[in-house]
Amino acid sequence: LDVEKYEKNNAALSEELSTLQSNHSELEKNILSLKEKSISLQSRKTALQSQVEFYSSIIANHDGRPEGVKNILSNHDAYPDVIGALSDLIDVDESYQAAVEVALGEYNDYLVVKSRKNAEKLIADSSHRLSIFALDSIPKVISTQEGYPATSLLSLVKCKKELKGLLTILIGDVCVLEDEKKNPDIKSLDTWKWVSKSGRYYCRGFIHKSIGSDSESIIGRKQKLELLKME
């Protein structure tokens, strides 16, 4: 009887040991998986930190801007009347940033101030070449464009109300060419300008511009930085 009892106990212990070994093996797999996830998350964190530092540096140093604009934007306390560079004052969905940038062209780097007096003072005080929009001098615009033949580029740009009139003048006649592979049928007297999502711009049949593919759009830098900080 004792032998039977010991055999039963041994069988029970063997089964318990097998279960514990199985659990131990499963726990080791979980630990290994968690370690791999931890390494992956740490790597992702490092990559995000690098991107945040990169965009913070670009924004702080105003990389890509003309020297005069960089000097003014980097010394905001000395130029409190400057609202900012135009491209920093608008929000555009990432897929349309190239289109808006190429359509605005040189206007991306124009400084925006509240008044003509502010603009004249900036030019008088600076030895650099400057281009400035004075908001109090923007004419009231009633769009003569009706029945857009395609999506209006202006409708894809978010901005403060004070900038709406300015943007209407600058890109209110630009339509988005949705088909990247098809050139628009533009006549020389066509009143519409066209731009593709990838940044190809057409005007009146003889003006062609492209944003290229070597550099990232200057529009959306602050948006990109905020999104990275949220991750």
Image (spheres, rainbow, N blue to C red):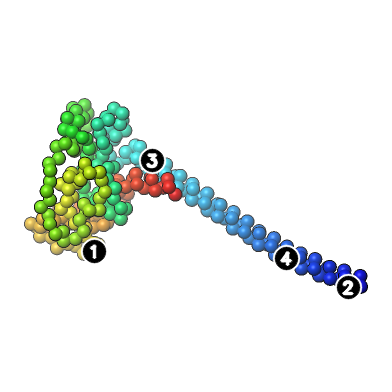
Q: Amino acid at mark 4?
A: Thr
Tell whether 205 sits left or right of 159.
Answer: left
- Label 4 residue SS: helix
- Label 3 residue SS: helix
- Residue under circle 3? 56
How far apart marks 4 and 1 lie (CA) works out to: 62 Å
How far apart marks 3 and 4 lie (CA) works out to: 54 Å
Which one is earlier in the sequence, the residue at label 3 or at label 4?
4
Which one is earlier in the sequence, the residue at label 2 or at label 3?
2
Of residues 118 and 64, which is closer to you in this image?
118
Which one is earlier in the sequence, the residue at label 3 or at label 1?
3
Quarter of image, res 49: top left
Question: Is residue 155 at least partly visible in the picture?
Answer: yes
Q: Residue at x 12, y 54 (%)?
A: 145
Q: Residue at x 22, y 35 (%)?
A: 113
Of residues 61 and 143, which is closer to you in this image?
143
Q: Amino acid at mark 1?
A: Asp
Which one is closest to the eye, mark 1 or mark 2? 2
Number of marks in the image? Answer: 4
Which one is closest to the eye, mark 2 or mark 3? 2
Which one is earlier in the sequence, the residue at label 4 or at label 2?
2
- Residue under circle 4? 19
- Residue under circle 1? 179
Which one is closest to the eye, mark 3 or mark 4? 4
How far apart marks 3 and 1 lie (CA) works out to: 35 Å
- Label 2 residue SS: helix
- Residue under circle 2? 4
Q: Amino acid at mark 3?
A: Ser
Instruction: Give the class, few, some or many, for how many residues have Cα within 10 Å of label 4's Cα (few <14, many ≥20).
Output: few
How far apart marks 2 and 3 lie (CA) works out to: 76 Å
